[in-house]
Image: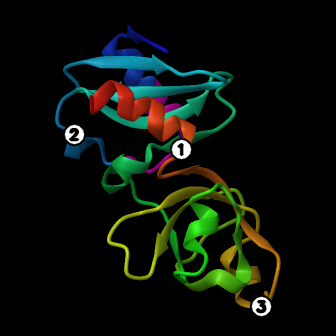
Amino acid sequence: MRIIDIRRKTARELITSSSLNVDISRLGSIKQARILILEKDYEVLIINNFPLIVFKKDHSIFFPYIESCNFFDSPDVTVDRGALPYILRGADVMAPGIISFSKFKTDDIVFVKCEGVPRVVAIAKALVDSEQLSNMKKGKVLENLHYVGDKIWKQVQKIFHK
């Protein structure tokens, strides 16, 4: 792991190219921009000392860092408590565990919430759209990309929460 400084313009370009609905105004002006290079294929864009966006080094996928969800406007699903232990071990989200959801399209980034838990527990990519989900009784709905306690989360915690 290492951190490199980048230009603010480069950070803005990364945010734009991510195609995520980021409310950058909530961060204030960009005073400092850095990239945390993680083990494996991932990097984290850090704005004003706050981890914001996780992305693959080849820029093939971008998603919010789990603790920065309040800066993004994304659809969400809520799962029952029985699904939580599996999701927090990296399992994809299956139709039977979903108790409510907002509208989304295939390949959208979706926040996974759990009943009774006050924060987002995972970030996922939609494998089907919400209209298809309405008629599903079984099968994978979301691919789990990032969750509380995963390797990305642990590596960022080492840096920012010593």
Q: CA distance from mark 1 to mark 3?
A: 27 Å
For this rendering, which residue is in front, 111 or 107? 111
Q: CA distance from mark 3 to mark 2?
A: 39 Å
Quarter of the image for residue 17 reads top right
* For residue 10, above or below residue 63: above
Residue name at image x 44 percent, y 43 percent: 65
Crowdedness near tag 2: few (<14), some (14–19) or many (≥20) residues, C-alpha within 10 Å = some
Label 1 or label 3, whichever comes before in sequence order: 1
Q: Amino acid at mark 3?
A: Asn
Q: Which mark is residue 27?
A: 2
Q: Which mark is residue 63?
A: 1
Residue name at image x 47 percent, y 71 percent: 113
The magenta segment is: 14-22
Q: Which mark is residue 93?
A: none
* For residue 37, above or below residue 86: above
Q: Is residue 19 magenta?
A: yes
Label 2 or label 1, whichever comes before in sequence order: 2
Quarter of the image for residue 125 reads bottom right
Mark 3 lies on residue: 135
Tag count in the figure? 3
* For residue 87, above or below residue 56: below
Task: Identify the element where label 1 is drawn.
Answer: strand
For this rendering, which residue is in front, 139 or 16? 139
Q: CA distance from mark 2 to mark 1?
A: 17 Å
Q: Position of residue 1 (x, y in %)?
A: 49, 15
Q: Position of residue 70 (x, y in %)?
A: 31, 56
Residue name at image x 36 percent, y 48 percent: 67
